[in-house]
Amino acid sequence: MIAKWYSCSYKLYNMRFMTAKAAEAAASSAYTMDEHQRIACAKVERVKKDSETQQKVSAQAIQEAHMWRSELAKAREHDVILEAVVLRAEEMVRVAEANIEARIR
């Protein structure tokens, strides 16, 4: 009878030991998963921050490109106006030269 009780007691102890081991393994696994999740979240936050920074830089570059296009358009308009002024001045010089030649004759 003592042997039977001892055998039963040993099995119960062994089961508790295995359950404790399983609980310990589960806790260790949960801790590891939490650690991996924390690392993954940190990476996601870092990538998100980098993405936001790149979007800001991109938006600034686009804004600057639009500004330079506007400045280029203004410069082209100014160039057209200056060309017209030069053509008008050349025409005035030709007319003045023609008038001078006419007076000389």
Image (tube, helix red, strand yellow):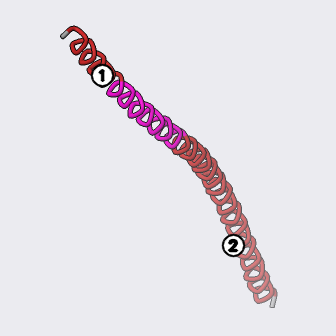
Left or right placement of residue 65 versus residue 101 in this view: right
Lower position in the chain sequence, tag 1 or tag 2:
2
Left or right placement of residue 61 versus residue 56 in this view: left
Q: CA distance from mark 1 to mark 2?
A: 100 Å
Q: Which image quarter: residue 94?
A: top left
Residue under label 1: 90
Is 76 included in the stretch rendered in magenta? yes
Residue 86, position in %: x, y?
Answer: 35, 24
Per the rendered image, the range of residues in magenta is 64-88
Left or right placement of residue 63 versus residue 37 in this view: left
Outermost residue on the left side: it is: 105
Q: Which residue type does callout 2 highlight?
A: Ala
Q: Which image quarter: residue 89?
A: top left
Q: Residue at x 22, y 15 (%)?
A: 102
Q: Secondary structure at mark 1?
A: helix
Question: Compared with residue 1, is residue 17 higher up or lower down, i.e. above or below?
Answer: above
Question: How would you rate the neighbour count of disc 2 (Cα within 10 Å): few for under 14, some for 14-19, many for 20 or more?
Answer: few
Q: Which image quarter: residue 82?
A: top left
Q: Which residue type does callout 1 highlight?
A: Glu
Residue 22, which numbered label?
Answer: 2
Q: Residue at x 59, y 46 (%)?
A: 50
Q: Residue at x 51, y 43 (%)?
A: 66
Disc number lying in front (1 or 2) = 1
Question: How would you rate the neighbour count of disc 1 (Cα within 10 Å): few for under 14, some for 14-19, many for 20 or more?
Answer: few
